[in-house]
Amino acid sequence: MDIFIGILEQGLIYSLLALGIYITYTILNFPDLTVDSSFPLGAAVSVRLIAAGVNPWLSLLPALLAGCLAGFITGIIHVKFKVKDLFSGIIVMTGLYSVNLFIAGKANLPIFQASTIFLPGQTFLARAPWSRYATILVSAVIVLLVKIGLDLYFQTKSGLLLRAVGDNHNLPTSLAVDANSMKVLGLALANGLVALSGAVLGQQQRFFEISMGTGSMVMGLASVILGIKLLDFIPKLRPSSKVILGSIAYKAVIAAAIALGLSPNSLKLVTALLLLVILVLSGRSKGQDPLRSI
C-alpha cells in the first residue's frame, strides 16, 4: 500500500513538471533545458519563504512567478538575441544554478519543523486519520486546478495561437500576431508550471537541495511521451489528462524497477533507457520525428 501511495504522490507532483515540458517540447517544439534549474528554483523560493515565516500556500505564487521569469528570460535570449533554442536554455539553466544558491543561502535548506501545505502544523488536520493521504489529496487538488486552467486557456484565442506557433511559425504572423511573443509567453508559462512542481516537491520533502532538478527535463519528457503513447487509443481524452497519467505511469515503472531489485543509484539510467525505448518505438511507428508525433 505504501508503494502505491508513493507512486501517486510523486506522480501527481511531477505531473506539473510534465505539463510544463508538454508545452515546450510538444506544443512549441522548443528543447528547453531551463527546466533543470527552474524546477529547483521553485523549491528554493518556496522553502526560503516558509523558513522566513511566510504561509506555505502563499509561497507557491512567488515560486510560480520566479519560474515564469526564468522562462521569459530564455525566450528573450532566443527571440531578441537570436540565440538558438538549445543554447538559450543552457545559458539560463547555468545562470540559475547560482541564483538558486543566492535565494536559498546554501546548497541544502531544510524546513523539517515548519508547516507546509501538506501538514499545517500541529493541528487536528495533522493528526486526522486521513493525514496519511494528505499529500495525494492536496497534490490532486493543485494538479486538477492547473489542468482545468490549462484546458480553458488552450481554448482561448491566445491558447490556440500558442499551439499554432510550434506547428506553423508563419500562421500567427499571417493573423497579425507576433509569433515570437507567443513563444516567449509559452516558455514563461511552461517554466512557471515547472517551478510550481519544484515548490510543491520542496514542501513535500521539507527541504531544498541544489541538485534536485538534475534530470528533470528527461524525466518530464519521458512522462509526456509515455502518457501520450499509452493513451493514444482514447482520442477524446485531453492531452493534459494523458500527461498527468503518464507521469503516474512513469513513477510506477520506476517503482517496479526498484521492486525488482535495482539500486536507487540506477534510477537515472533506467529513466534514460526508458526514454530511449519510447522515442525509438514512437519514431518507428509514425515514421517521423517522435517528438513531433505526439
Image (tube, grey):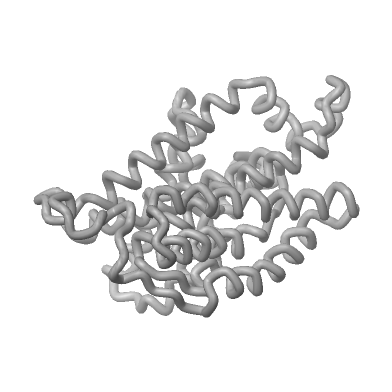
Location of the C terminus (image quadrant): top right
Residue 276 in view, yes or no: no
Tell me which residue sits at (79%, 37%) in the image.
181
Percent x, y for residue 62?
54, 51
Q: Residue at x 82, y 34 (%)?
A: 179
Q: In this rendering, would 46 be left or right of 262?
A: right
Rendered view: 48 above or below 248: below
The picture places residue 76, in percent across and down from the top left corner, at 81, 50
Q: Position of residue 22 (x, y in %)?
A: 58, 44
**Residue occupying the point 72% across, 27% down:** 161
**Residue 231 in which image quadrant:** top left
Residue at the outermost front position: 53
Image quadrant of residue 287?
top right
The quadrant of the rendering that contains the N terminus is bottom left
163 or 79: nearer the viewer: 79
Number of numbered tags placed on the structure image: 0
| Residue nearest the viewer, comparing 20 with 250 | 20
- Left or right: residue 47 versus residue 177 is left
Identify which residue is drawn at 52% across, 79% down. Answer: 106
Whether residue 196 is visible, yes or no, is yes
Q: Quadrant of residue 26?
A: top right
- Out of 272 and 190, give the one closest to the viewer: 190
Is 217 rendered above or below residue 181? below
* Of 70 and 271, the residue lying toward us: 70
Q: Looking at the image, which residue sits at the far left?
A: 129
Taking 292 as reference, is 255 above or below it? below
